[in-house]
Image: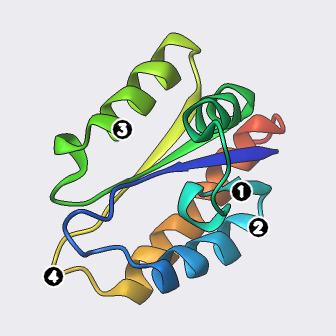
Amino acid sequence: MRIFVSYTTRDGCLSGSRLAQVRQVVRRHGVPFIDALEGEAPERQSRVERALIDAQLVVFLRTSSFDESPWVRREQRIASQHQKASVTISITSETKWANALLDLEMALADATRSANGFK
Protein backbone atom coordinates (compact mmCIF):
# COMPACT_ATOMS: atom_id res chain seq x y z
CA MET A 1 0.00 0.00 0.00
CA ARG A 2 1.36 3.42 -0.95
CA ILE A 3 0.88 5.99 1.83
CA PHE A 4 1.24 9.74 1.28
CA VAL A 5 2.07 11.87 4.33
CA SER A 6 0.81 15.46 4.29
CA TYR A 7 2.28 17.93 6.81
CA THR A 8 3.85 21.32 7.30
CA THR A 9 7.06 22.24 9.07
CA ARG A 10 6.11 25.93 9.39
CA ASP A 11 5.35 25.78 13.11
CA GLY A 12 8.40 23.75 14.12
CA CYS A 13 6.33 20.82 15.43
CA LEU A 14 7.72 18.50 12.75
CA SER A 15 11.43 18.32 12.03
CA GLY A 16 13.41 16.14 9.68
CA SER A 17 14.20 13.70 12.49
CA ARG A 18 10.55 13.47 13.49
CA LEU A 19 9.51 12.90 9.89
CA ALA A 20 12.11 10.11 9.70
CA GLN A 21 10.41 8.52 12.73
CA VAL A 22 7.04 8.89 11.02
CA ARG A 23 8.50 7.16 7.96
CA GLN A 24 9.63 4.22 10.15
CA VAL A 25 6.08 3.79 11.49
CA VAL A 26 4.48 4.13 8.06
CA ARG A 27 6.89 1.56 6.55
CA ARG A 28 5.36 -1.10 8.80
CA HIS A 29 2.09 -0.62 6.90
CA GLY A 30 3.13 0.33 3.40
CA VAL A 31 5.40 2.42 1.21
CA PRO A 32 5.60 5.99 2.51
CA PHE A 33 5.97 9.20 0.55
CA ILE A 34 7.22 12.09 2.68
CA ASP A 35 8.33 14.92 0.43
CA ALA A 36 11.02 16.34 2.74
CA LEU A 37 12.71 12.93 2.90
CA GLU A 38 12.56 12.22 -0.84
CA GLY A 39 15.38 14.58 -1.81
CA GLU A 40 15.36 17.42 -4.27
CA ALA A 41 14.20 16.72 -7.76
CA PRO A 42 13.23 18.67 -10.83
CA GLU A 43 9.50 18.86 -11.27
CA ARG A 44 9.00 18.63 -7.51
CA GLN A 45 5.40 19.79 -7.57
CA SER A 46 4.35 17.23 -10.17
CA ARG A 47 6.28 14.49 -8.32
CA VAL A 48 4.40 15.29 -5.11
CA GLU A 49 1.04 15.39 -6.90
CA ARG A 50 1.74 12.08 -8.68
CA ALA A 51 2.68 10.43 -5.37
CA LEU A 52 -0.56 11.69 -3.83
CA ILE A 53 -2.70 10.51 -6.74
CA ASP A 54 -0.98 7.11 -6.70
CA ALA A 55 -1.38 6.64 -2.93
CA GLN A 56 -4.05 4.36 -1.49
CA LEU A 57 -4.00 6.20 1.85
CA VAL A 58 -3.20 9.75 2.95
CA VAL A 59 -1.96 10.58 6.44
CA PHE A 60 -2.60 14.17 7.51
CA LEU A 61 -0.28 15.26 10.33
CA ARG A 62 -2.31 18.18 11.70
CA THR A 63 -0.21 20.75 13.57
CA SER A 64 -1.05 24.36 14.47
CA SER A 65 0.00 25.72 11.04
CA PHE A 66 -1.46 22.83 9.02
CA ASP A 67 -4.43 24.77 7.62
CA GLU A 68 -2.29 27.82 6.82
CA SER A 69 -0.06 25.97 4.36
CA PRO A 70 -1.01 26.43 0.70
CA TRP A 71 0.70 23.10 -0.11
CA VAL A 72 -1.35 21.28 2.52
CA ARG A 73 -4.58 22.86 1.29
CA ARG A 74 -3.72 21.75 -2.24
CA GLU A 75 -2.95 18.21 -1.02
CA GLN A 76 -6.27 18.10 0.84
CA ARG A 77 -8.11 19.24 -2.29
CA ILE A 78 -6.40 16.63 -4.49
CA ALA A 79 -7.03 13.88 -1.91
CA SER A 80 -10.70 14.84 -1.79
CA GLN A 81 -11.04 15.01 -5.60
CA HIS A 82 -9.54 11.52 -5.88
CA GLN A 83 -11.57 10.19 -2.93
CA LYS A 84 -8.51 9.02 -1.03
CA ALA A 85 -8.90 7.15 2.24
CA SER A 86 -7.24 9.17 4.97
CA VAL A 87 -6.31 9.32 8.62
CA THR A 88 -5.58 12.47 10.59
CA ILE A 89 -3.20 12.67 13.52
CA SER A 90 -3.43 15.87 15.57
CA ILE A 91 -0.18 17.10 17.05
CA THR A 92 -0.12 20.10 19.39
CA SER A 93 2.67 21.69 21.39
CA GLU A 94 1.43 19.65 24.37
CA THR A 95 1.40 16.32 22.51
CA LYS A 96 4.05 13.90 23.67
CA TRP A 97 5.86 12.74 20.56
CA ALA A 98 5.77 9.07 21.61
CA ASN A 99 1.97 9.35 21.92
CA ALA A 100 1.69 10.89 18.44
CA LEU A 101 3.68 7.99 16.98
CA LEU A 102 1.49 5.50 18.84
CA ASP A 103 -1.66 7.23 17.54
CA LEU A 104 -0.21 7.01 14.03
CA GLU A 105 0.61 3.31 14.45
CA MET A 106 -2.92 2.51 15.64
CA ALA A 107 -4.59 4.60 12.91
CA LEU A 108 -2.51 2.93 10.21
CA ALA A 109 -3.24 -0.52 11.60
CA ASP A 110 -6.98 0.23 11.46
CA ALA A 111 -6.76 1.73 7.98
CA THR A 112 -4.76 -1.12 6.50
CA ARG A 113 -7.02 -3.69 8.16
CA SER A 114 -10.04 -1.95 6.62
CA ALA A 115 -8.34 -1.76 3.22
CA ASN A 116 -7.77 -5.51 3.38
CA GLY A 117 -11.42 -6.20 4.17
CA PHE A 118 -11.05 -6.89 7.89
CA LYS A 119 -12.99 -5.15 10.65
Q: Which of the two discs, 4 and 1, labels the residue nearer the N terminus?
A: 1
Q: What residue is at 38 percent from the left and 27 percent from the top?
A: 74
Residue linked to disc 1? 32
Report the amino acid beneath label 4.
Answer: Glu
Report the amino acid beneath label 3.
Answer: Trp
Quadrant assignment for the N terminus: top right
**Position of residue 113 measured from the top left corner of the image (x, y, whole percent):** 75, 47
Report the amino acid beneath label 1.
Answer: Pro
Of residues 87 and 113, the one nearer the viewer is: 87
Residue linked to disc 3? 71
Q: Secondary structure at mark 2?
A: helix
Q: How far, Cα to Cα, is label 3 from label 1? A: 18 Å
- The answer to whether mark 1 and mark 2 are in CB contact below 8 A is yes
Is the residue 7 above or below the residue 85 in the image? below
Q: Which of the two discs, 4 and 3, labels the residue nearer the N terminus?
A: 3
**Position of residue 29 measured from the top left corner of the image (x, y, whole percent):** 77, 60
112 horizontally vs 117: left or right: left
Quadrant assignment for the C terminus: top right
Is the residue 3 above or below the residue 40 in the image? above
Of residues 59 and 106, the one nearer the viewer is: 59
Badge 1, how many Cα within 10 Å: few under 14, some, many 20+?
Answer: many
Q: Which of the two discs, 3 and 1, labels the residue nearer the N terminus?
A: 1
Nearest-to-viewer mark from 4 and 3: 3
Q: What residue is at 24 percent from the left and 60 percent from the top?
A: 63
